[in-house]
Amino acid sequence: MFNFLNTGKTKAAIVDRLANQYDQIIKDHNKLEELRSLNYPLINLEDDQKRFDIRMARENINFPRGIEKIIGGNDLVDIVKLSTILKVSRSVCRILYNNQALGTGFLINGNILMTNNHVISSIEDCGNIKAEFFYEVDEEGRILNPIQFRPEPETFFFTSDIQQKPEDEFSGLDFTMVALEELNVKGKKIADIPSLEIDGNAGKINKGGTCIIIQHPNGQPKKTSLNNNSFFSETKDQIIYETDSLSGTSGAPVMALDTNEIVALHQTGVPKMDNNKRPLTKSGAVATLGTPDDEIEWVANAGIRISRILELLEKKNFDDPAHNLKKNEILTRTHKIKKELKEVMKNQPEVSLAEVKNEAQKLKDPVSAIEDKTLNKGNTVDDSIKFPFIILAKNSPKNFDNLETELTLNYGKDFNLFLATPVSAKEDEEELFILNISTGGKNPNEFARELLSLEEVLHAEYDSEIYLNMEVTYDDEFKALESSGAKDFNNEKRFLELYSQSSKYVKGKSKEEYRQWNWKAVNYNGSITDIIGKSVKIVQFDTGYSHHPKNYGAFDLTEDYDFVDDDDNSREEENHKIFTLADAGHGTRTGSIIIGNLYSDAEENGNCGLLNQNGVKLIPYRVAQDVVIIGRQEELAKAVDAAIATGAKVITTSMGLPPTMTTYNLAKKVYEKGIIWCCAAGNEVKEVVAPAVHPGTIAVAASNPDDKEWKGSCRGKTVDITAPGMHVYVPKSLKQDSGLFRYGMAYGHGTSYAAPHVSSAAVLWLYKNREDLKAYHGYQIVEAFRFCLKDSARTKHDLPPDDFGAGILDIDKLLKTKLPAVSTLNNAYDGEDISRVAMGFRTVGESLKMLWNGIMRSIIQGIRGKESLQFEGYEMSDHAKKMVNRNALQSKTLGESISDPEENQSLATFNAIREKVLNP
């Protein structure tokens, strides 16, 4: 909770941060209550495989005993735990400001006091602070003799401001560490006070685990809470728990009962909020900054993760060598435990969370086998639900009739079967079909394999949600911009630090010039000034458009479409269900490189679209729920069909998926229609993603202002060209506390930004060669572009050889390159055996998709710090598990490969399987 010395500004900062997560906290709390009402094990709350694996490793015992201990910890604990709580409590103190109770703290590593920044904010505060130990009652209810010590900030002091400040990478975590005097005025030694050693590794607690707070609520004698203490929700920086607390608890240690480890630094209560995210009182009125804490309706409590605090400490380099020595001492236990856990995990049997939940239920209730269709989706399937499947089959009346007959005989008449791309489908060709059907209670992945037994089916897959590879990478200063408390959009200071001396596009240039460095890098001087308009139509597959002055009037909103919600409004703000997501506005940022206005009302204006002067408008197709998830591949298929039907000449796509039979088929279809499909090569996973990896597309990797590789860019033999993708100046939006938006610009990274450069070049090339290209048809147009693109590429650069295509895009030279003779152009799909390709995907397609989702979750978690992400509703089929295990390195099994990104096992396994499909 808040203490009486907190200013309104501090209260507001805490509430604003919680507001963004409030809906998820309430959702998680409702799930906790539901589990309790059904008497389900609270391990069902857990959704992080890696955290569970490390938690098991801490037990270092066999699986059944480990599970029993973990679920038993929610109800029964060894009596020795109470003794440990008492030991930990001796390190906890009351913090006084001018002898008035202010908050709680605890002692670590001999003489370091740890508390919140909003309790001790600065070195100046320390002059009025005392840490009072043993302020507690004995068995007779008498106050013991407390011992007080003063801070010595000159010996050690490190704080992280409660406010996130873009200019301070160490701000935003609300903690303070300060040394205490070795000897107090009464001759008492700080060395005689028991202290704790904290551990920054994961796995100290699982969701559903019990949190114990040892605290001085309202400045009272030391207390703790023993009822309803479960950890049930989380953010990047905080864990959320039920444990009771009061004002004055700020800075208390939050201990995991099962492991006796400190997991968080208690920070605040979570107030109940109305629909506008305003805190409410117990009477239902809106609370003000002056409302006393005891009148506010509290729903939970929140603490700063110890792991995040120690992560920040690890990054800090102090000017004083003595401070660095103390820093290393504080981190010693974390490094030691990390090595020990790694050793244990090497020999630990792999167990999925679904298996854990099954075993946990048996141990809790061995008599009744409870089947929960909501909480344990991986084990039971509602018979009434129709699931979407994508089928590859010959598009002929006879084959369609036979397929309908077989489905009716095997599963009844209650299904829907239709073409995925009806406009562009060819008769007697293999085409994609959508099948919506009940699985009869079977796991949909297993059911997909059952469909393969039908003679008419070449390939079948459950059309499950897939994590997207879009803009998953930001450097630290760019991430800071996503905070609602950020004061400035522009990370230009960092940009200039990196490139002002090394980049020829930046050194000695004016602000207007270096913000448009990407134009110089692709050697485009705006040589085509004609109005191209709709004569060369370009469509964008992305998250939709969002309002930003940089793009006002530049999107074509007469032909846009939302394929997720199936309506003609692709505006992201109106459809984005989780608009607080950092990457909201992805379609606007990538689109600005193509059609962004030269001038706008955005703060720190700069850069503009390569086609802005040509009157080209970008048609936005919303094909993804948001930047993290694409709902169904069916939506991507519909978008491809619409692009073909409306006469699109260029498609720009700044998102990636695993290679699937669906993306393969769609890429081939677009290619044969002569549409130039420019695709981002992908971020962080190294190997090129789909659709870029398929032969019919143009795959684009990313470079930086030094003409070097962007380290996060995917690369490989299938890359055609490279374009600017690191520190490209693009639009940004900030949602303020008032609910209104501020609009500005900032430098961002990703192959998401590289692809639009090539898409723009494709439009200019098509227009420039419009007369000559009348002799080219279908795929020949794409191959002619590919030839000119590579032939004109700039080879003077510092990119690694081979894996970044022909070089860096050179638009002016591209527009002057002579077209190749039609007779020299070959179809990229010549010699393909569609049955063989389908066989490859039907064998490993599901494995690829499920491994991919695990990899992307790890990347998103690591970069965004989001540790609770949606996971697959259904587990892999037995066949897919075998494929993963067979291809996993060092005989590592599925669970480990997905949850061990540190050793890149899942990525290595994914790429091994991927090669079997792409290069059979």
Image: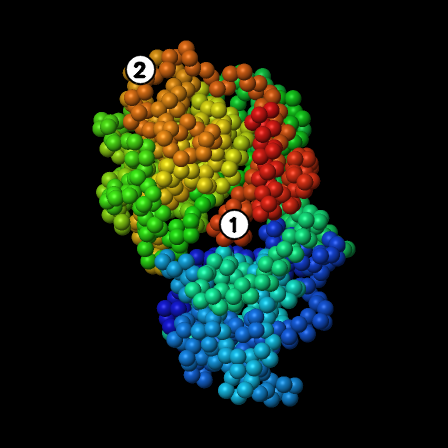
Give the CA distance from mark 2 to mark 1.
Answer: 50 Å
Determine whether the residue tagged by mark 2 lies in a helix, strand or loop. Answer: helix
Sequence-wise first label, 2 or 1: 2
Around disc 2, counting alpha carbons within 10 Å, would you say few (fewer than 14), some (14 to 19), or many (20 or more)?
A: few
The furthest residue to the right: 367
Q: Is residue 489 above or below residue 690?
A: below
Residue at image point 43% right, 47% down: 474
For label 1, count other residues whose C-alpha is less than 10 Å away and answer few (under 14), some (14-19) or many (20+). some
Judging by the rendered image, the residue that carries numbered circle 1 is 861
Q: Residue furthest top?
A: 823
Q: Is residue 193 above or below residue 335?
A: below
Residue 843 seen in this snapshot: yes
Q: Is residue 827 above or below residue 371?
A: above
How far from the left and from the top, in percent, is residue 382?
Answer: 63, 43
Residue drawn at (49%, 41%), measured in percent from left and top?
684
Could you say which is closer to the camera, residue 708 or residue 782?
A: 708
Label of residue 772 in the image: 2
Say which element carries label 1: helix
Q: Dots 2 and 1: beta carbons under 8 Å?
A: no
User: Where is residue 409, by image quadrant?
Assistant: top right
**Amino acid type, callout 2:** Asp
Who is closer to the viewer here, 342 or 654? 342
Percent coordinates x, y for residue 115 in the rendering: 49, 71
User: Which residue shows up at 29% across the image and 42% down it?
Assistant: 506
